[in-house]
Image (cartoon, rainbow, N blue to C red):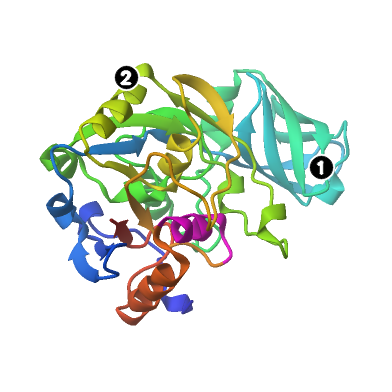
Amino acid sequence: MPRELIAQCPANIRDESRLLVLDRKTGSIEHKIFSQITQYIYPEDLLVLNDTKVIPARLFGAKYGGSARIEVLLNRQLSVDTWEAIARPAKRLAVGSVIEFSRGFYAEVKDKSDDGSVVLYFACVNGFDEALKKHGIIPLPPYIKPPTSNFKLQNFSKRYQTVYAEKTGASAAPTAGLHFTDGLLGKIKAGKIYVTLHTGYGTFAPVRTEDIREHRMHSEAYEICDKAIRAVRDVKARKGRIIAVGTTSVRLLESADSPGKGETDIFIYPGYQFKRVDAMITNFHLPKSTLLMLVSAFAGTELIKNAYKEAIKERYRFFSFGDAMLIL
């Protein structure tokens, strides 16, 4: 991946990013602007969007009673005051260690794993949500160089949310949805439903096992309402297409069979037989990632390789703030 193609900032206007359209049946590739996606979405289709909202999940503190600096990335909420998180450097922490983020804002390590993940119990004088809002930072991906000015950082943080983000709980954005504007959504005549999957670190963690079947995904919390389940069944009955916005929507749709809350650690890789999704809007993903394996399962490994080669040749922008692909 040419480093200069890794997008370091969002497009000036959300729906003016580029769109590569890949047809699975013919293998053909078209180059469009994202706002032209309306040409490919029909009234009988159903657009499924993930309305999770990224929280300021990155915290910086110090080990209580010492000087060791600790960075924490919240990953998954386990209870009102307890979170699974990634801590760096984890080797400086033990079960029982306390991290102080500010006066009156602490976390105790309740459990620790070999992979650097910890379970933290938070104690906050003014409540966890207020403390996180005051001291937390929206966790931009590590390959994006943070802006030097607070104004640019705030703008980046705002653009790292979809315009329909509503339910807080994610530590990473469902980036395929970043290209939509309210105006563009209004032009799409297809049905629309919103589901929630709180994206965590595990979705983006690289696969390090020699045999990919040995890779274990982190669990992510989801919620899908009865209306959404019925809409999915109805569109199938009338032979319309289910178009998932992002791999997170895909994973939820392929996991949930009934309305309600749950968790999924589904890992989709080539050989998987899709049950519901007919088309997918997605960004361009990192090498060795589970997301790249998911889109390869959907479109075929060789087609995805060809599409990525074409995108590199045409100088598309890659990863979270990059351009998009529509797989039909």
Answer with the quarter of the image where residue 32 lies: bottom left
What amino acid is found at the position of numbered circle 1 in the picture?
Answer: Ser
Q: Which secondary structure, mark 2? A: helix
Q: Which residue is pictured at 42% across the width and 55% down the height? A: 298
Q: Do labels 2 and 1 touch, CB within 8 Å?
A: no
Q: Residues within 10 Å of mark 1 (few under 14, many from 20)?
A: few
Task: Report the Cα–Cα distance between label 2 and label 1.
Answer: 39 Å
What amino acid is found at the position of numbered circle 2 in the picture?
Answer: Lys
Q: Nearer the viewer, residue 279 or 26?
A: 26
- Which residues lie in the magenta part? 288-298
**Would you say 147 lies left or right of 216 here?**
left
Q: Residues within 10 Å of mark 2 (few under 14, many from 20)?
A: few
Res. 227 mark: 2
Name the magenta segment's main secondary structure.
helix
Q: Nearer the viewer, residue 84 or 240?
A: 240
Q: Which residue is pictured at 58% across the width and 30% down the height? A: 263
Which comes before the other along the chain, label 2 or label 1? Answer: 1
On the question of residue 136 being in view, the answer is yes
Q: Nearer the viewer, residue 275 or 39?
A: 275
Q: Which secondary structure, mark 1? A: loop
Q: Is residue 160 positioned above or below 11 on the image?
A: above
On the question of residue 68 being in view, the answer is no
* Residue 75 drawn at (x, y percent): 62, 38
What residue does disc 1 label? 113
Q: Is residue 289 magenta?
A: yes
Q: Is residue 104 magenta?
A: no
* Residue 177 drawn at (x, y percent): 33, 46
* Residue 62 drawn at (x, y percent): 76, 42
Q: Which residue is pictured at 88% across the width and 34% down the height? A: 95
